[in-house]
Image (cartoon, rainbow, N blue to C red):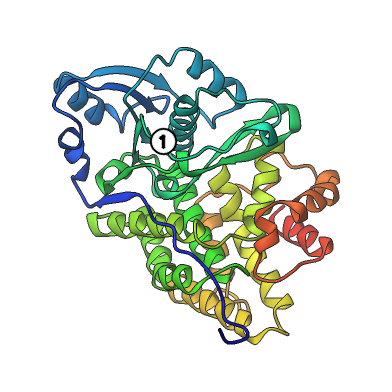
Amino acid sequence: MAEGTRHFGISCPTAVHFGAGRAADLPGLLPDAPARILFVQGASGQAAAGVLAALRGAGHDVTLVCCPGEPSVETVNAALAKLGHPTHVIACGGGAVLDMGKALAALAEHGLTLPADFATLPPLTARQNIRLIALPTTAGTGAEVTANAVIDVPAMGAKISIRGAALIPDIALVDPELAQTAPVSVALASGLDAVTQVIESYTSSAATPFSMALCRPAIPLGLVALRQVIETPDTKAWENMCWTSLFSGLALANSGLGAAHGLASVLGAQLGAPHGALCGRLLIPTLRVNHEYSREDPEVQDRIAYCLQAVVDAFAPVRTNDRLSGFEAWVNAKGLPRLSDLGLSEDRITALAELGSKASSSQKNAVPLPVRAYEAILRSAF
């Protein structure tokens, strides 16, 4: 094999059913005999109500678990204690709900609870007895096709992922009609998360030809769709936003992310702030810093320049010589909170920059960044 040839695998084991109305396919994907279903939904259950009613109408034995926020060690273990022996876990909600369902299916399959130290978890190998089906109701995380679940660990002041084949859904039903029920603030934060994921996956130092092929068309598509679902939502805009989110999950499962997600993981745990809002606020200064530090790597700078041009095409600049100024003005006008609004105090920036530089996503950033660059990103977003 020639010197410099890259080695990579492709991971996309979930069967994806995409399109408006596809949630109605769910009963036909289950056995005729009544299944024992653990159904995980968000606090309100509004988006999941029709899906839940269809399952009960089909005669299945349904146990309901509500996930009002991001899953934690405590809430996961409390749910496991009441679990019984389901044949199926169906998660219908945003990224946190999907992560809760994925964690419950994986741990129940292996007869485990979450320990204080995740390093002691045995390998979460592929499930054999419990089927896992994911129905996202937000267009953001792409969790319906990834092999990890983010868990809040308050004792460590961190959010940590558990990973393994057991967390990969067997089926994802991606129905844009479900996403349309989200409040505008949720749609904005979720959409920004999806856009950040396709951009960071595309520019990641661990990007592969497969992940880049997914992300390159999704970046301009997602930026335009984001604007449309907030300002002039229609069926096509929501379909494109959900498509971007799905592609972002497939891409990050085959590459990595970057500094915006690395910092967001730290800030989310420290501040209890919404992940999508953090990513959206951190994306713009991260792009600026990455462009500056990539000057000696023409290939990486070309990929970053492609992202910058996609932003310009979707959000015309409002300041000369600042290609991201239009995007920044738009998210400000739409009410995206700054880090100070989300609870960050200025005296913590230096310490959190240090932590962010060590986060797992930061290790796959487009270019290596010194701690002072992470501090500059936080100060710009403050």
What residue lies at 67% left-to-right and 76% top-to-bottom? 291
Q: Residue 184 placed where, x, y %?
A: 41, 44
Q: Which residue is mark 1?
A: 127
Instruction: Examine the image and state in which quarter residue 286 appears.
Output: bottom right
**Residue 14 at least partly seen:** yes
Q: Name which residue lies at 47% across and 70% down.
A: 315
Crowding at dot 1, Cα within 10 Å, few <14 / some 14-19 / many 20+, comes out as many
Image side of residue 131 versus residue 267, left or right:
left
Where's residue 68, x and y in %?
48, 25
Q: Residue 274, image x and y in percent?
A: 57, 40
Q: Which residue corresponds to the image point at 53% horizontal and 37% vertical from the top-left?
A: 124
Q: Nearer the viewer, residue 152 or 195?
A: 152
Q: Quadrant of residue 4?
A: bottom right
Q: Which of these two is toward me, 369 or 274? A: 369
Pick the front one: 13 or 68: 13
Hey, what amino acid is under mark 1? Arg
Q: Residue at x 52, y 69 (%)?
A: 202
